[in-house]
Image (cartoon, rainbow, N blue to C red):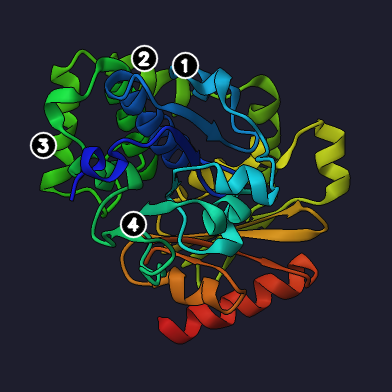
Amino acid sequence: MTIDEFIGEAKQVAIFGHVRPDGDCVGSTLALYNYILDNFPTAEVQVYLEKFPESYKILNGAGASLPLFDATPAASANIDVAFLLDTPSFERVGAGGVACLQGAKKTCNIDHHISNPKNLCNWNVVDANASSACEVLYTVLDPQKISVRTASCLYLGIVHDTGAFKFSSTGKRTMEIVGDLIDKGVEFAKIVNETYYTRTYKETLVTGYVMQHCKMGIDGKVVYSYISPETMKDFDVTPVELSNVIDVIREVGGTEVAVFLYPVNGKYKISLRSNYVVDVNAIAKEFGGGGHTRAAGGDTDLPPEEAIEKILGLVEKQL
């Protein structure tokens, strides 16, 4: 089946991603949004996304997204098709989308998380071997109908979930898709530079603080750090502005695992990355989370020092 076939004659379409949306989440939801705008002129489509980095507003439609769905039975029943992108569970759905996904006439989940049960929606397109949800989404779109604005969204998502093509999830198909997107006129250098390699002054300062307070564990195989609510207040940053810190921490040479904890909604968000050996998805599951073999996350009520001690023990068991 293709997206075109699934949408059919739908009049009302809603698109959702996960909480604390990252580049792949924003890229995939907005790519689908633009694809529908371009090819289904009679359909009314709306994207619902929680707050995301300002730099992603380089994408068409980013400014038109809404932060919360009107979660009434009548509003949900009015939706002909609801899409869920880059999200492996209802617990991770953002912007109040669960009610819509439970009440819409038809639903579709497009994802690449290994923890996805593949039964969240009526149609589940889940490929754990894909680099990103954007890569999965591309496979069910008509390549001839992908405009430059849709292609730009797909490109941003792939760039972010592959770490600018340096993560092990990057495959031959990934690069073939990227080549096609570039052929469509994507300003690839601008997207990479302005959304992946640059950060605001505040983000630069707080990232420097986090790096300055990094510690090593397990004979230098793990690098970890955390930040307190008080320090976040001092730097005047939100969780959204800390979402990419983990990718800087993982650059410490000689390490296998990077760990970063930061406060979100009264808990500590745990971000985990590994290079070659450790399955951080298995570790994240111990904290009620999940993700991918080399990138995963969860939440904890434990003080950060205790949570890190537990994580170190789990990493050591795998090593």
**Residue at 58% over, 79% down:** 286
Which image quarter is the C terminus in? bottom left
Identify the residue shown where x is 42% and y is 50%. Answer: 86
Q: Which residue is mark 4?
A: 112
Quadrant in the rendering for residue 69: top right
Question: Which residue position holds label 3?
Answer: 176
Q: In the picture provided, is 181 more to the left or to the right than 42?
A: left
> Which secondary structure, mark 4?
loop
Residue beneath label 1, please?
58
Q: Is residue 119 left or right of residue 47?
A: left
Decide: is 97 above or below 232. Answer: below
The CA distance from mark 3 to mark 4 is 18 Å
CB contact under 8 Å: marks 2 and 1: yes
Alpha carbon separation for disc pair 4 and 2: 26 Å
Picture coordinates of residue 9, whole percent (x, y) = 31, 35
Circle 4 crowding by C-alpha within 10 Å: few under 14, some 14–19, many from 20: many
Going by the numbered disc 4, the residue's amino acid type is His
Mark 2 and mark 1: Cα distance apart in space: 9 Å
Q: Earlier in the sequence, mark 1 or mark 4?
A: 1
Q: Tell which tag, 2 or 1, sits nearer the viewer.
A: 1
What amino acid is found at the position of numbered circle 2 in the picture? Answer: Lys
Measured as percent of width and height from the top left, residue 138 is found at: 23, 39
Q: Indicate which label's residue lies in the foreground, 3 or 4.
A: 4
Which mark is first along the chain, 2 or 3? 3
- Which tag is nearer the camera, tag 3 or tag 2? 3
Residue at disc 1, secondary structure: helix
Q: Residues within 10 Å of mark 3 (few under 14, many from 20)?
A: few
Q: Which mark is residue 190?
A: 2
Query: Circle 2 sits in a helix, a strand or a loop, which is it?
Result: helix
Q: CA distance from mark 1 to mark 3?
A: 24 Å
**Type of amino acid at the residue the image marks with label 1:** Ile
